[in-house]
Image (cartoon, coloured by chain):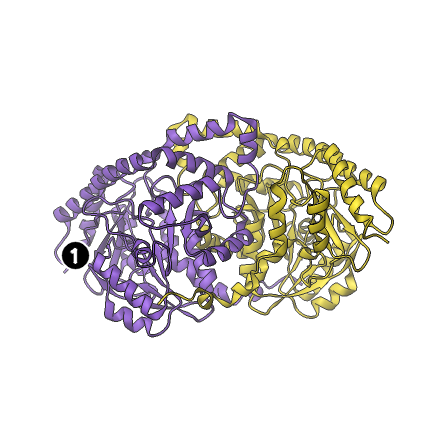
Chain colours: A yellow, B purple
Amino acid sequence: MTVDWGNVFAGRVAGMGASEIRELLKLLERPEIISFAGGIPDPDFFPTAAIARAYEKIFQSNSGAGGALQYTISEGFTPLREWICAYMGRRGIQAGLDEVLVTSGSQQALEFVGKLLIGPGEKILVTRPTYLGALQAFSPYEPQYLSVPGDAEGPDLAAVEAALEQKPKFFYLVPDFQNPNGTTISLARREALLDLCAKHGVPIVEDAAYTELRYEGEAIPSIVALDAARNGGKITNVLFCGSFSKTMVPALRVGWINGPAEVINRLVLMKQAGDLHTSTINQIVLHDVVSQNFDSHIRRLRAAYKERRDAMLTALDDFAPAGVTWTKPEGGMFVWIELPEGTDGVELLARAIKDANVAFVPGSAFHADRSGKNTLRLSFSNNNPERIREGIRRLCGLLQTVAA
Amino acid sequence: MTVDWGNVFAGRVAGMGASEIRELLKLLERPEIISFAGGIPDPDFFPTAAIARAYEKIFQSNSGAGGALQYTISEGFTPLREWICAYMGRRGIQAGLDEVLVTSGSQQALEFVGKLLIGPGEKILVTRPTYLGALQAFSPYEPQYLSVPGDAEGPDLAAVEAALEQKPKFFYLVPDFQNPNGTTISLARREALLDLCAKHGVPIVEDAAYTELRYEGEAIPSIVALDAARNGGKITNVLFCGSFSKTMVPALRVGWINGPAEVINRLVLMKQAGDLHTSTINQIVLHDVVSQNFDSHIRRLRAAYKERRDAMLTALDDFAPAGVTWTKPEGGMFVWIELPEGTDGVELLARAIKDANVAFVPGSAFHADRSGKNTLRLSFSNNNPERIREGIRRLCGLLQTVAA
C-alpha cells in the first residue's frame, strides 16, 4: 500500500494554499518585462566590498574560521545582540541581551509570533491591507482574521476598538511605509493605538522592516519606543521585529525580535527546536558590517531609493489616467494604486504581462478577507529611474483601458 | 494595563519547556571539563580552505556577489538541488528537482515534518531512545508519542506492529548510528519495517544525519533507497532528511528534505512562510565545496572519527566497572552507556561536572516517555584520543560509585 499523503497532512495545511499570483509571477524572468512586483532591494546598493572584507577577515585565522563554521547558541551571536541592544538603546529602549533573539530574517520572527500566540480559531487583528508574508506566516496556525480599515494617519480607531472587544491575541502593524501601501501611522495615532491595546491587554507586533528607509519628513518614534517610554524604558506590551534584509542584504537571512524576556525565553526554545540557530558565519559578517558602516550605508540607500520613489511618483503624475489614485510614501519601497471599483487586479496582471511587458502584485493578495481587488502594489526599489518611467508609461497605457 | 504574556501564549507552548539538562550544560564552558555532551563535529576537520576559496570566488565578480547576496527561490539554489538529486541518484533514488527542498539544517526539515503532519493529539511513532532534537521539533505540534523499544538490529517488530494498529501519522527513524545510542538498523529489519508501514499506510521519516560517517562494515541501503527500489526508483512512502552539518560544517545551516513532489510542494510553501529561503550565499558556497570535495572529505572524516571512536571504546574496555554496558557503534558520533537500574543520569551529571570535570547527556532526554534514567549518551567527535581516554578514566572513576 502506498501512503495517501493528502490524508496524512495535518489540518493546518489547508491554510497554506498556493496562490494564483505566485504562478503568474513565475513569468517574470523574461528580460523584456519591467517588474514592479518584488519588494526586493537593488544589489547595486549592497555593501558588497564591506561584506567581502568581513569574510576575508574570518578566514585569516584558523581558530576564527573554526568558530565561524561551528554550531552556536540559539539566542544568536552575542556581539550582534549587543549591537542590536545599542541600536534599540539609541531609540530610547533599554533592551538587555535576554530580550533579543536573532532570527533567520524577520520573516522567521513573524512565523515565531504565529507559533507562539495563535491557537486554532483564535482571533488576530491586522490592517486592511497588510503584509502578505505576515498572512503566510500566521495562516498555518489557523487564526480568524479581524481586518481593520484605515486612512492616511493609520488604522481607524473606532474599528480597532470594536475589533479589540473581540479579544484578538495580538495586533500586527507595519507602522512605517507599510508594505504594501506605503502609508505611515502618525504619532498621535500610534499613541492612541497603544492606549487602546493596553486597555484591552492586547500586545502589538511591530514590523519595522522599512523603518530606516525614510526619504522625507521627520522620523516618528517606533511604537516600541512609545511603549518603553511609558514603562521606564522597558519593552512591555510590544514585540518588535527588525530586519537587515532591506538595510544591508537579504541573503544572509538575519533579522531579530525584541520583546520582554519572558517572551524571548520561549522564542529561544522555539528557535532551538526550529533550526537550532541562524548561520554563525552570516551573523559574524553582518555584525562586522553594521558595526562599521550602518549609518553611512543607510544615508546612501536613502538618497538612492528616494530618486526612484520620485521617478515613480513623477511618472504617475505624467501618465496616469483620470480615475486612478495612488499613495505618496515618505519612505520604503512601495506605491499603492487604487483603480475604479470593479477592476480586477489579477486579471489586469495577466494582461500587463502579456500585452504591456510590465508587472506588479495585485492588491487582493494583501487582504486577509480577499477584498481590495481594485488595488495594485508597485515597488520602485529594483529598477533605475529610466526603467521606472518606461514601466509606468506602459502600465498607464494599459490603465487607460480600465479607468473611468 | 500591561499584557499578561503567559495568558496570550498558544496552547502548544506548554510542550516547549526548558530542560534541566540545558541548564546543567551551560556549565560546560569551564576549560577543565572534558565534555562528551554535545554531538558536534571537530572544527579541525572542517574543509575550511575550500570554503574560504568558495567565498573568494563569489566576490571576484560584482554580479556574482550581487546574486549571492540577494533573495532567492524558496525551493533552494538550483545547482545545489541538482547535486542532491545526483547524490540520491547514486543511491538508486530517481529524485527530480521538484522532490527536493533545501532547508536550514536538517533540524528545520524535522520542524517542517511536524508542522506538515502532526495535528494536536495525533499519534506519532518513535524509537526508545530517539533523537532529542526531533522530540523538540515535534512536541510544539502536540503529538501523542508512541515509543517502541528495540534491540541491536533495530526496533522490535511486534511492538511496531502493535503501535501501527493505533494509526500514527508517521514513524520517525535514525537508521544509521542513531543519535543517541549508536545502533544501526539491519537490512532485514529495514525491509520488515517498510513492509509493516506500507501495510498500514504509515509514512517513514528517515533522518540520515550520520549515514556518511561509517567506520567499519558494509553500508546498508537507506530506507528511502529500499522504498524507491519497490516503486520504480521513485520515493513513495518515505521522507528523507539529509544534512551537511556533520559531513561539511554546521554553521552554514544547510540540509534538505527529499520526498514525493506532492509533499515537497507543500513544504516549499511552508519554507516561504517560515523564513523565505535558506541563505543564498551559504547554499552557493556549500554547492561549490561538495561539488569538488565531497567524497575525499568524507574519507578523511571517517579516518579521523574512527580513531576517536576506537579511543573511547578502548578506554571503556580498560576502565569501566562491572555492571556498566555500552554500545559499539559502526559509525556516527555516539556511544550509549547503560548503568544499573536505579541510577539517575541527571543526578550523575551534576556530580560528574562538580567532582570529576567530565560531562555527558543523561539518556532520559532522548525518551519521549522520560524513561531511560539509567542511560548516558557520550559523544566522541569533539575531543582528541588523549582527552577521550582521560575523560573516560574520570567518568569511570565516578561510575565505580554507582556500579554494582
In the rendered view, would you say A149 is above or below A378?
Answer: below
Please name the amino acid that badge 1 sits on.
Answer: Val
Question: Residue B61, position in %: x, y?
Answer: 53, 26
Residue drawn at x 72%, y 58% as measured from the top left: A128
Q: Nearer the viewer, residue B330 or A196?
A: B330
Question: Residue B372, position in %: x, y?
Answer: 27, 63
Say which quadrant the C terminus of chain B sits in: bottom left
Judged left or right of residue B72, residue B135 is left
Judged left or right of residue A57, residue A147 is right
Judged left or right of residue A236, residue B209 is left
Q: Nearer the viewer, residue B110 or A171?
A: B110
Q: Which residue, given by chain and number where applicable, does mark 1 sit on?
A: B324
In which image quadrant can residue B117 be found? bottom left
Say which quadrant the N terminus of chain B sits in: bottom right
Residue drawn at x 47%, y 58% as measured from the top left: B262
Looking at the rendered structure, the secondary structure element under dot 1 is: loop
